[in-house]
Amino acid sequence: MKKRYLYLGTLVFFVLAAGFIVVKYKKNEKNKAAVFYALHGRKVRSEEYKGVQARFAELMKIIGTNPDDTKSRISLAALYIQEARVTGEYRYYDMAAMKYVNEVLTIDPGNFEAMTFKAMLYLSQHHFAEGLAMAEKAREVNPYNAFVHGIIVDGNVEMGNYKAAIESADKMISIRPDIRSYSRISYLREIHGDYPGAIEAMKMAVDAGPAGDESTEWTRVQLGHLYENTGDWESAEMNYLISLQYRPGYAYAIAGLGRIAAASKDYSKAIAYYLQADSLVNDYSFKEQLAELYQLEGNKTKAEELNKWLIKAMSNDAKEGETDDNIGHYADRELAHIFLKTGDYDKGLQHATAEYNRRPANIDVNETMAWVYYHKGNYDKALPFLDVALKTNSRNPTLLCRAGLIYAKAGNKVKAKEILALVLQHDSGIEAALKDEAINVFKSL
């Protein structure tokens, strides 16, 4: 009899608990639906932004009077996505865009534009598998849309499906050769070791976009970065200056000038550029570079403070995913590298492994795993990951430097010397500490 009452009591408890969870879920969803996402403004004001503000006010008015207007919701989501790119406030604007994308999908589950935007937002938050799956679902609705093929390219690259990425890029450019398709062709050529081809395609991408537009200037900066990696600093600087001429105050072009100053070991000048870039756009990579520059300048206190701040901020962003399946930026690979710089190799391995478990075929993730094991002194464990990192024949100078150092420590001096000779023949963009280490090891081989 007691067991029966115990059973009934347990059953009642679970029913009540389930009911509480359902009620809480519905309440949370209702609260999310009621949230208003205002524009946060830009640190660089322009006529362009006045147009954005006017368009935002117009869309909010339409949506407020017509709860079933999916077209305006899609337009508003697109506006939020663009503001995320311009300001770097991805977490806030991605959440705003996701709200309206989900509202459209509630009204019209097969809405193609909403599915493509949701796929983009997943990728933006580093939910790569989910983003790729959503993009492939959208492709089933419209297989002749170039934009969705571009998202599939991105998703496959991040998941390490490079053959599939090339196939989608070929499909994309055959449908619509434009700034988006040329830039993706460029990136695929770059990660397969074809820098001349990558530069050619990125030039075509720049020429295909309107000068001064954010996406065009982003592409021009990527062209500059390609020149950095090949040691052509003069061409890199020229592209950054042109970008600033067309889009004054463009943070990523300013950061490019910072990299050029750092390459010349003018760390004070480089820090000034990065501080300016950091004041204009919220981008953790600027603070990562600042921490590195402070370390090189000898200001270890500032470097440590910045690294601690980055670890806390990135970890908080990732926790968003614990309460919202749609939003929550995975940053384990970035955290792994920061922990390596702070000397906490176990934490570095923990985060690198978390990222590896999500996408074990990605070359960048495998490079991170190999580099963590290098720091832990476990060179034999680093080698299998390094093999995967090198599988596309990438000629990225940082990857090659790390590969040479790992092979040297693992006892393969012939391969180490071959790789380091290849990368050190050009004055390419490599962090100063890594370059110095590579030069010293090369001399000892």
Image (cartoon, helix red, strand yellow):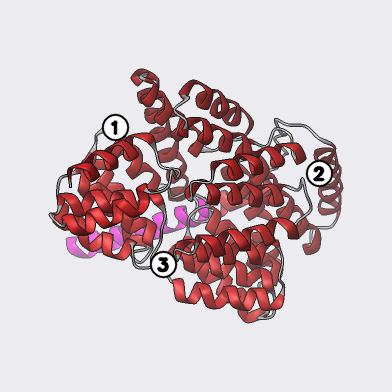
Question: x%, y% of residue 200?
Answer: 62, 62
Question: Residue 65: image x %, image y %?
Answer: 86, 53
Q: Nearer the viewer, residue 22 or 58?
A: 58
Q: Residues within 10 Å of mark 2 (few under 14, many from 20)?
A: some
Q: Which residue is mark 3?
A: 160
Question: Which residue is disc 1 drawn over?
Answer: 342
Q: Is residue 118 visible?
A: no
Q: Which residue is mark 2?
A: 52
* Residue 139 falls within the magenta-colored stretch: no
The vertical placement of 41 against 161, above or below, is: above
Specify whether 25 is left or right of 13: right
The residue type indicated by label 2 comes to: Val
Whether pointer 3 and pointer 2 mark residues with C-beta atoms closer than 8 Å, the reply is no
Circle 3 residues within 10 Å: few <14, some 14–19, many ≥20: some
Residue 62 lies left or right of residue 280; in this view the side is right
Q: Is residue 111 above or below residue 99?
A: below
Around disc 1, counting alpha carbons within 10 Å, would you say few (fewer than 14), some (14 to 19), or many (20 or more)?
some
User: Disc 2, disc 1: CB below 8 Å?
Assistant: no
Disc 3 to disc 2, how far (Cα)?
A: 36 Å
Query: What count of labels does the image hold?
Result: 3
Residue occupying image coordinates x 74% and y 39%: 247
Q: Quadrant of the N terminus?
A: bottom left
**Which amino acid does the dot numbered 1 rest on?**
Thr
Q: CA distance from mark 2 to mark 1?
A: 41 Å
Depth check: give the residue in front, 14 or 1.
Answer: 14
Give how far apart the Cα atoms at labels 3 and 1 are: 28 Å
> What secondary structure characterizes most of the magenta part?
helix
Question: Viewer-nearest of labels 3 and 2?
Answer: 3
Magenta residues, start to end:
1-25
> Is any atom of residue 71 visible in this view?
yes
Pinpoint residue 176: horizontal percent, then vertical percent. Answer: 72, 73
Q: Is residue 291 above or below residue 70?
A: above
